[in-house]
Amino acid sequence: MNQPLEKKRDKKLAELYKQESEDLAVVLAKRHGLPYLDLSKTAINTDALRLIPMMEARAAGMAAFKVIGRTIHLATIAPANPKIAEIIKDFENKNYQTELYLVSENSLALAWSLYAEISESEASDVGLIQISAEQITAYLNRFQALSNIQSALTEENRSAEQGSGISTILEMILSGALASEASDIHIEPEEKAVRLRYRLDGVLADVSEISTRIYRQIISRIKLVSGMKLNIKLTAQDGRFSIKVSGEEIEIRASVIPSAYGESIVMRVLNPKSIQLSFENLGVEDRLFKIFEKEIVKPNGLILLTGPTGSGKTTTLYAFLRRINLTGSKIITIEDPIEYHLKGINQTQVNREKKYTFLSGLRSALRQDPDIIMVGEIRDGETAKIAINSSLTGHLVFSTIHTNNAAGTIPRLIDLGVNPKIISSALTIAIAQRLVRKLCPACKKSVELTAEEKALLTEVTESIKLKRQDIVAPVIGQIFEAVGCLACNGSGYKGREGIFEAILMDEAVAKITTENPDEKEIRRAAIPQGILDMRQDGILKVLNGRTSLEELRRVIDLTAEII
């Protein structure tokens, strides 16, 4: 046979076969309710392809071909394959969203053929920075103090070349944050240099300076792994990535905003160890602890927490949920964002682009037959009303609301349009909290009181005696102050604990709630409950040497009127 004619025939047959394959894929896509896609006409991103190992991709009959932000685009020939559901679930647990397309066998074979082009030496998961166990251990041993981190970064910053050393510097920054137990990493460009700071126990501490040239490469790297757009510099962006440490993943939430000298970066370190505070170790005073124990196991009701950003509300809520997470109960959360993953709890995340808000999430959760619901925040009247109605219809509801103190919760709900009579029936307890730094036990020292300090402490302890006969306040003579040593990175503080206050919805408070009361009236009505306010709770911690008066003054107003 004539060879050119044979080639022409084979080409024609191949085209016909491909068209038949695509036509079949179109029919199957309609049958499964999925969008159809021809991968031969679509760019396939190899970074996306790496997200699913080749053997797993072949076993599932699928491939990842594109990543936009935190959305992974997937192609499959077999949407019913149970392995696909497993892979999608794994992505969702890592806070990715997925979009599934049906493709032809030819299309999928084209995607699979590209695995051969992926070099193992170049492979790096999108959204995942690999730090070996040996490397992190080495850094943790080196970084015993902020000065160690500073010197290491200064040295590495000097030796870094264009396009090299960036991963090392970024690993050092992240490892230093883990070693010092920082909650946040701040990278702030200034006129002549870039400032690196860690938030330690709620307070920012200077760590080092980074050259502007290295900074530009670092921010590109962070944007890349976080799923942000590299070319967008005048608009705020958010993203996430993970640090892999000894086989475990620690999530990092990244935020970038434009500033006068470049883009400012803040990375929140979501270390699971920092949230694993037990219910018993929250630092709650004995009587209030017993009240918490009683209220969180009730079958229904509304429990509200209030406090500013960074006051530990999430930690407290998670401690509550872990305490009541029993096999016989279904717990659903609506969060913005999901900061930590809790085993056995159905956690969902707000997505405003897809119109999944606290309000719509709460409505959806109620259709899932839950026993317990946690709503990240009550921001509007409609969400407040649904949360309250849910508590009245057999659900236990946890949420947060913005007020300065526990007594302010009721006026705030009334301002949002909730009927006061319904509030008195639904709300079981309102809790306010702050976080204070604990004095470092290795270096704290006792100091004599000034006349002004003694007068303040005397006034508060006397108010405690009037409220609670069972509390014996320490003798007022001396208090402790921060010094600073190697163990606490020179700050004088190590760790944090909560100071709390609460208002129970008892008969007296319920009666006054229907009269549209102000905060003072609510606090007076709650006096017989014998619950300490935040100032009283904080002063007791000062007198017991757990924190300093200076630190307490930093987080609450010590001059407020005592009721």
Image: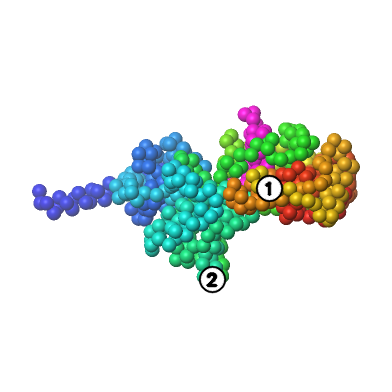
Identify the residue at horizontal 67%, vertical 34% (top origin): 323
Crowdedness near tag 2: few (<14), some (14–19) or many (≥20) residues, C-alpha within 10 Å: few
Identify the residue at horizontal 55%, vertical 57% (top origin): 207
Of residues 36 and 193, the one drawn nearer to the viewer in this rendering: 193
Q: Secondary structure at mark 1?
A: loop
Mark positioned earlier in the residue sequence (2 or 1): 2
Tag 2: residue type?
Glu
Left/right of residue 552 with respect to residue 237 in the rendered view: right
The quarter of the displayed image where residue 302 is located: top right
Q: Which mark is residue 127?
A: none
Tag 1: residue type?
Lys
x and y percentages locating residue 388 in the rendered image:
75, 43
Residue matched to label 1 = 444
Left/right of residue 166 with respect to residue 534 in the rendered view: left
Of residues 243 and 371, the one drawn nearer to the viewer in this rendering: 243
Q: Which residues are magenta?
A: 315-339
Residue 537 in view, yes or no? no
Residue matched to label 2 = 191
